[in-house]
C-alpha cells in the first residue's frame, strides 16, 4: 500500500526539488560512466577506421545476469556416452549428450541419474526411440573454460515430428505457462455460483434496461466487452462501452493477483488457449454472458450525427446483455441481409425484454456512427496497416487440413473503433489525475533508417513514396493505398513492409517520462495519450489501469460530495475528473488531493516504481506471446504442408538477382528466397541493365545427384517440373489426377495454379507459380521452402 503523505507529494509533483540534492552524487557517477563509455566507443571507432579489415575483439570479464535462455533449452538426447577431459582409461561415464535445437547453443551433457524416472528406465532398457523425442532442459552449471555446459532434463515432451510436442516446446522456450492455476490462486475466487451482492446494486449505475450486447468470435467464452446504444434525440446518440470489472475480483497483492501478473497475458494459438485468469472468472463470474447481471466499468458518450463527442460519463455499473453476436452475425446485420425472425427461431438467442429488431437497429446505427468516427480519425493522421493472418482449418482428428487468409470485416472495425475510443478516454483521465504513476501505452515514431529502407523498397518497385520523415509517411500511406487499390496482393506486400519500419508499441509509466510528454504519444493512432483498458480478462496492464480509474471515479465522487456539486446520476453531466474536460483546479485543491490520495490507497494504485516494473515485465511477456503465436503458426503450417506433401500458390517477385529471387507467396502471406545458382540442367541469364532474369532448362538428360560436383545441385532442388498430363486443372482433374506423381497426394494437385512454361522471364513484381512444401522436422523444427512450378 501507498503512504498517503508521500503519495500526496508525488501527486502534486513537488518532490522533484526535494530529491535534487540527494541525487547529485549518483548523477555525477552516472555522467562519469557515460563519458567513459563514449570515450571507449570513440577509441573502438578510430581503431576500426584505421584497420577496416579487422573486427574488434573483446574479453568477457564477468556475467552480470544469467540469460533466461539458460532455463529454456529444447533439444534431443544422443545416447553415445560422454568422456570427460582427462579420462585416460576409456571408462564410459554415466553421461549422455543433449543436442540443442538452437544452433547458437553448444552441445550439453546430461547425467543419466538426473533424468526423469520414465526416461531413465527407457534408457536402461535400451530404448533408442528416446533419441527422437524433444526434451525440455535447463543449464545447471557452466564452468569457466568448459565448452560443454551441464544441463538437466526437466521433462520429456514427445516425438519431435508431432504437433503437440512442438507446441509444448514453443511454450517452454518462451516461458508461457500451460499449467493449472495454483490452489492459492483458486482460493481467492468467489464461491460458485456467484451472485452480485445487494450493496453493489446500491452503489452502481443500473444499466440493465439499456439494449446491450456483445460481439465476439463465435467460439469465444471470455466475453469482456459489451456495447449499448440509445437515442437521446434525433441527432444525438448515447453509446456505451462496458468492460468486465475484473479488478473487483482480482485484489492487489493476493495470490491470484501475483499469478495473473506473472502470466501477464492470455495466449491464443490454434486449438490452445492459455488464460491469464482462471476460467471460473474469465468464463463465468466476469464473462458478460447474455441474460445474466454482470459488474462492469462503463464509459458512455453522447455523440452527434457527425461523429463529434458532446458528453461523457465513466463509472461502475451493472448490465445485463441481451444477446451474444458473432462477428459473422454482426456483419450479416450490417450488410442488410439479416432477416429479422419475430418468432425467434433463427438468429442469435435473445434474453430479456429486448427483441431482435432492437439489436439490429442498434447495431446498424452503431455502424453508421463508427464509420464517421473512423473517417475523422484517419483524416486526423492515424493510419491503418492491416497484415493478413493465416487461419487454419482442422479435421476431426485435430490436424490442419487447409488454410486461408483471414480478412477483417466491418463488424470488427466497428468494435475496434469503440475500444480505441474507450482506451483513449481512460488514458486522458488517469494521466491527468495521477500524472506520476499512470500506466499508458506509447508508440514511438519510426527510426529514420527504417523509413529510408521502406522508401527504397518502394522506389525499386516503381512506387515513388516520400517516407523521409514519420510525418510524411503519415501522408504517403493513404496515397499509396489509393494508387495500388486495384492490386490487393501488392498492397499486402507494401503494408507488411511498412509494418517492419514501425517500432513496437510499449507500456510505460508516466513518471518515467515526466517533462517529456511529447514522448507519451501513440504514433500509429496519431493521438497524444493511449492505454489498454478494454481487455482485463486477458491483459494484466488493463487490471492496473482499472484500479487507477476506480480511484479516480471514487475521488471524483468524494470531491463532489464535499463540494455538493455532483451531476445528476441519470445523465451525463460535467464531472470534474472523468468528464470531457479535466478540472485541474479541483485536482490541485486540498479537497481534491486528499480525495485522490485516499482513493489511491483504497484501490491499491501502485507507486511509479512498481508501475515501471509492471510495464517492463508486461512488455517482455507481450513480445514472448507474439513469438509463441508466430512459432505456433509455423508449426501448423509445416504440419499442413507435410500432410499435403506439396501445395501450389501464385507468388510475387520482390527481389531478383543473378543467383536468387525473393518471392511473396500469396496463399500463406510469407516471403521465401529461391536460390538457383549452380543448378544442373538450368540455364540462367541475368540482364543487369533491365533487372531481368531468364531461366530455361537444358534439353539433355539430367545427371544423377551422385554424378554432380559438390557445389552443384539437381534441378529438382529449385524447380518442380510437371509434364502436361500431370497438370491438374478444375476442368480435367477427374481424368488426370491419377497421373500425378506418387509423392504428391491427390488433393494437393487439384489446384487452379498452373505451371509456367520455359523459358521463364522474371522481373520485380512478376507473378509466378510456386510449389511450397516443408522439409526437415526430425528435430522438431521443419522449414518451409518454395520451388518454381514449371513444365
Image: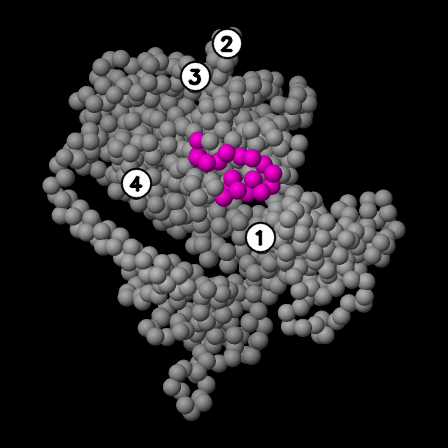
The disc placed on residue 562 is none
* Label 2 or label 3, whichever comes before in sequence order: 2
Between label 1 and label 4, give the one nearer the viewer: 1
* Label 2 or label 1, whichever comes before in sequence order: 2
* 3D distance between C-alphas at marks 4 and 2: 42 Å
Given residues 751 and 378, the one toward you in this image is: 378
Check disc 2 and report the residue beneath it.
235
* 3D distance between C-alphas at marks 2 and 3: 12 Å
Q: Could you say where residue 736 lies in the image, as x and y percent from the top left? A: 86, 53
- In the displayed structure, 485 sits above or below 759; it is above
**Magenta span contains residue 459:** yes
**Magenta span contains residue 415:** no
Q: Secondary structure at mark 4?
A: helix
Residues under numbered marks 1 and 4 in contact, where contact means CB atoms less than 8 Å apart: no
Within 10 Å of disc 4 (Cα), the crowding (few <14, some 14-19, many 20+) is: many
Q: Could you say where residue 276 lies in the image, as x and y percent from the top left? A: 43, 44
**Side of 353 relative to 29 (left or right):** right
* 3D distance between C-alphas at marks 4 and 3: 31 Å
The disc placed on residue 611 is 4
Question: What's drawn in magenta, residue-wise?
Answer: 453-471
Check disc 1 and report the residue beneath it.
634
* 3D distance between C-alphas at marks 1 and 4: 35 Å
* Label 3 or label 1, whichever comes before in sequence order: 3
Residues under numbered marks 2 and 3 in contact, where contact means CB atoms less than 8 Å apart: no
Q: Secondary structure at mark 3?
A: strand
Check disc 3 and report the residue beneath it.
309
Amino acid at each position: 500500500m501507498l503512504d498517503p503523505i508521500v503519495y500526496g507529494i508525488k501527486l502534486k509533483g513537488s518532490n522533484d526539488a526535494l530529491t535534487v540534492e540527494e541525487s547529485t552524487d549518483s548523477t555525477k557517477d552516472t555522467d562519469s560512466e557515460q563519458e567513459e563509455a563514449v570515450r571507449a566507443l570513440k577509441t573502438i571507432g578510430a581503431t576500426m577506421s584505421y584497420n577496416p579489415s579487422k573486427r574488434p575483439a573483446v574479453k568477457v570479464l564477468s556475467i552480470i545476469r544469467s540469460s533466461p535462455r539458460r532455463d529454456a533449452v529444447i533439444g534431443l538426447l544422443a545416447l553415445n556416452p560422454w568422456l570427460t577431459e582427462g579420462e585416460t582409461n576409456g571408462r564410459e561415464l554415466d553421461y549422455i549428450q543433449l543436442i540443442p535445437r538452437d544452433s547458437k547453443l553448444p552441445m550439453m551433457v546430461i547425467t543419466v541419474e538426473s533424468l526423469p524416472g520414465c526416461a531413465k528406465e527407457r534408457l536402461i532398457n535400451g530404448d533408442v526411440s528416446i533419441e527422437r523425442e524433444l526434451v525440455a532442459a535447463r543449464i545447471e552449471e557452466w564452468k569457466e573454460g568448459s565448452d560443454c555446459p551441464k544441463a538437466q532434463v526437466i521433462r520429456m515432451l514427445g516425438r519431435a515430428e508431432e504437433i503437440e510436442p512442438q507446441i509444448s516446446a514453443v511454450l517452454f522456450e518462451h516461458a508461457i505457462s500451460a499449467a493449472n492455476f495454483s490452489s492459492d490462486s483458486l482460493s481467492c475466487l468467489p464461491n460458485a455460483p456467484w451472485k452480485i451482492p445487494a450493496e453493489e446494486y446500491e452503489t452502481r449505475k443500473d444499466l440493465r434496461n439499456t439494449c446491450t450486447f456483445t460481439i465476439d468470435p463465435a467460439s469465444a467464452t471470455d466475453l469482456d466487452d459489451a456495447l449499448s446504444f440509445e437515442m437521446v434525440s434525433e441527432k444525438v446518440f448515447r453509446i456505451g462501452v462496458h468492460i468486465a470489472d475484473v479488478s473487483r475480483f482480482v485484489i492487489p497483492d493476493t495470490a491470484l493477483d501475483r499469478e495473473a501478473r506473472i502470466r501477464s497475458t492470455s495466449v491464443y494459438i490454434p486449438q490452445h488457449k492459455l488464460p491469464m485468469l482462471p476460467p471460473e472468472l474469465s468464463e463465468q463470474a466476469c464473462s458478460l454472458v447474455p441474460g445474466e447481471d454482470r459488474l462492469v466499468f462503463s464509459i458512455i458518450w453522447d455523440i452527434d450525427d457527425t461523429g463529434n463527442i458532446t458528453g461523457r460519463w465513466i463509472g461502475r455499473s451493472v448490465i445485463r446483455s441481451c444477446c451474444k453476436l458473432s462477428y459473422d452475425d454482426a456483419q450479416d446485420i450490417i450488410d442488410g441481409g439479416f432477416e429479422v425472425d419475430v418468432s425467434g427461431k433463427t438468429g442469435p438467442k435473445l434474453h430479456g425484454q429486448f427483441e431482435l429488431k432492437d439489436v439490429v437497429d442498434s447495431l446498424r446505427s452503431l455502424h453508421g456512427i463508427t464509420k464517421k468516427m473512423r473517417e475523422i480519425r484517419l483524416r486526423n493522421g492515424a493510419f491503418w496497416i492491416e497484415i493478413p493472418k493465416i487461419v487454419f482449418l482442422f479435421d476431426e482428428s485435430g490436424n490442419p487440413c487447409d488454410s486461408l487468409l483471414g480478412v477483417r470485416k466491418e463488424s470488427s472495425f466497428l468494435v475496434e473503433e469503440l475500444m480505441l475510443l474507450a482506451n483513449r478516454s481512460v488514458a486522458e483521465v488517469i494521466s491527468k489525475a495521477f500524472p506520476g504513476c499512470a500506466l499508458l501505452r506509447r508508440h514511438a515514431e519510426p527510426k529514420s533508417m527504417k523509413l529510408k529502407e521502406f522508401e527504397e523498397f518502394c522506389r525499386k518497385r516503381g512506387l515513388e513514396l516520400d517516407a523521409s520523415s514519420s510525418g510524411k509517411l503519415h501522408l504517403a500511406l493513404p496515397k499509396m493505398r489509393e494508387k495500388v487499390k486495384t492490386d490487393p496482393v501488392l498492397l499486402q506486400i507494401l503494408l507488411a513492409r511498412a509494418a517492419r519500419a514501425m517500432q513496437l508499441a510499449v507500456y510505460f509509466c508516466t513518471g518515467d517520462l515526466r517533462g517529456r510528454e511529447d514522448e507519451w504519444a501513440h504514433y500509429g493512432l496519431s493521438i497524444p495519450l493511449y492505454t489498454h483498458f478494454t481487455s482485463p480478462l486477458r491483459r494484466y496492464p488493463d487490471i492496473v489501469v482499472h484500479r487507477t480509474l476506480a480511484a479516480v471515479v471514487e475521488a471524483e465522487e468524494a470531491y463532489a460530495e464535499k463540494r455538493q456539486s455532483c451531476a445528476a446520476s441519470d445523465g451525463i453531466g460535467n464531472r470534474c475528473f472523468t468528464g470531457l474536460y479535466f478540472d485541474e483546479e479541483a485536482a490541485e485543491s486540498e479537497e481534491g488531493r486528499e480525495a485522490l490520495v485516499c482513493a489511491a490507497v483504497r484501490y491499491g494504485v501502485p507507486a511509479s516504481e512498481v508501475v515501471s516494473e509492471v510495464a517492463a515485465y508486461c512488455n517482455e511477456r507481450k513480445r514472448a506471446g507474439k513469438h509463441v503465436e508466430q512459432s505456433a503458426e509455423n508449426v501448423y503450417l509445416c504440419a499442413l504442408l507435410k500432410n499435403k506433401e506439396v501445395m501450389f500458390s501464385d507468388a510475387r517477385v520482390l527481389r531478383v538477382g543473378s543467383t536468387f529471387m525473393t518471392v511473396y507467396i500469396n496463399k500463406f502471406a510469407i516471403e521465401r528466397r529461391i536460390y538457383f545458382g549452380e543448378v544442373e540442367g538450368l540455364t540462367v541469364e541475368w540482364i543487369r541493365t533491365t533487372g531481368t532474369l531468364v531461366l530455361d532448362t537444358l534439353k539433355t538428360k539430367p545427371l544423377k545427384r551422385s554424378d554432380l560436383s559438390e557445389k552443384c545441385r539437381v534441378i529438382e532442388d529449385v524447380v518442380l517440373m510437371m509434364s502436361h498430363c500431370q497438370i491438374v486443372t478444375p476442368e480435367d482433374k477427374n481424368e488426370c489426377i491419377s497421373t500425378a506423381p506418387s509423392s504428391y497426394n491427390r488433393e494437393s494437385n487439384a489446384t487452379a495454379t498452373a505451371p509456367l512454361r520455359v523459358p521463364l522471364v522474371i522481373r520485380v513484381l512478376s507473378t509466378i507459380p510456386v510449389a511450397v512444401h516443408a522439409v526437415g522436422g526430425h528435430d522438431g523444427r521443419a522449414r518451409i521452402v518454395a520451388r518454381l512450378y514449371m513444365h
